[in-house]
Image (cartoon, rainbow, N blue to C red):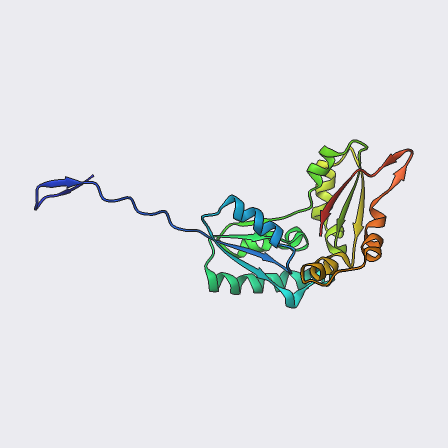
Amino acid sequence: MRVDLLAGTAYTPAAMPAPVPTILVFDSGLGGLTVFAEALNARPDARFVYAADDAGFPYGRLTPETLVVRVIAVIRRLIETYAPDLVVVACNTASTLVLPPLRERFRIPFVGTVPAIKPAAQLSRSKRITVLATPGTVARDYTRDLVETYAADCRVTLVGSRHLAGYAEAELAGAPVADTAIAAELAPCFVTERAERTDVIALAC
């Protein structure tokens, strides 16, 4: 309540509209659009900026040191340009490696995407699951820690695909990939041992 002493009247000012948050969704390519779609569904009121580091794609081919330096540099430029309130790193390869240094250098919150090992283990009946990702992601200590924490009761196969991310980008760009090529990347995911067969695959690519 505000009182205007000169006029001797009291009035309640009109409610100010809530500020519109800016959310930056970042990925190495177009795959993060699926994450963007879910974020948009959760926060339709927000202003979104989608950034794809096409020049660095695919991140799976970069050394850990190179990837950290590159992502930090790109994110810094994006923050300076768009001043986001939140950054979503829609890339498993980057999230499993770069989230800690990003959080150390910038004050805004970061949300990452990591291999869905926990729900995969919960859904599996045969207790044999596969994590399909880039070679870099399956090699990360972060990924192996997720396996130990959430899938200790499962037999976990880690498959590092060198081509699947590129195939996905090609499909999104309107350049279909042969089914035989995709099948070759998926084949190592299915393992049968003592009548137990892989029944859940966590796609982290």
Seen as rendered, the residue at the extreme bottom is 55
The quarter holding residue 60 reads: bottom right
x then y, percent, for residue 106: 51, 56
x then y, percent, for residue 83: 45, 59
Q: Quadrant of the N terminus?
A: top left
Q: Could you tell me which residue is drawn at 49 percent across and 46 percent down?
A: 43
Q: Nearer the viewer, residue 195 or 134?
A: 195
In the shown orientation, is residue 77 left or right of residue 198? left
Seen as rendered, the residue at the extreme right is 194
Q: Nearer the viewer, residue 140 or 27?
A: 27
x then y, percent, for residue 7: 8, 45
Q: Nearer the viewer, residue 62 or 190?
A: 190
The quarter holding residue 166 reads: bottom right
In the shown orientation, is residue 8 left or right of residue 50? left
x then y, percent, for residue 125: 78, 31
Q: Compared with residue 17, is residue 150 higher up or lower down, i.e. above or below?
A: above
Q: Could you tell me which residue is drawn at 85 percent across and 49 percent down?
A: 187
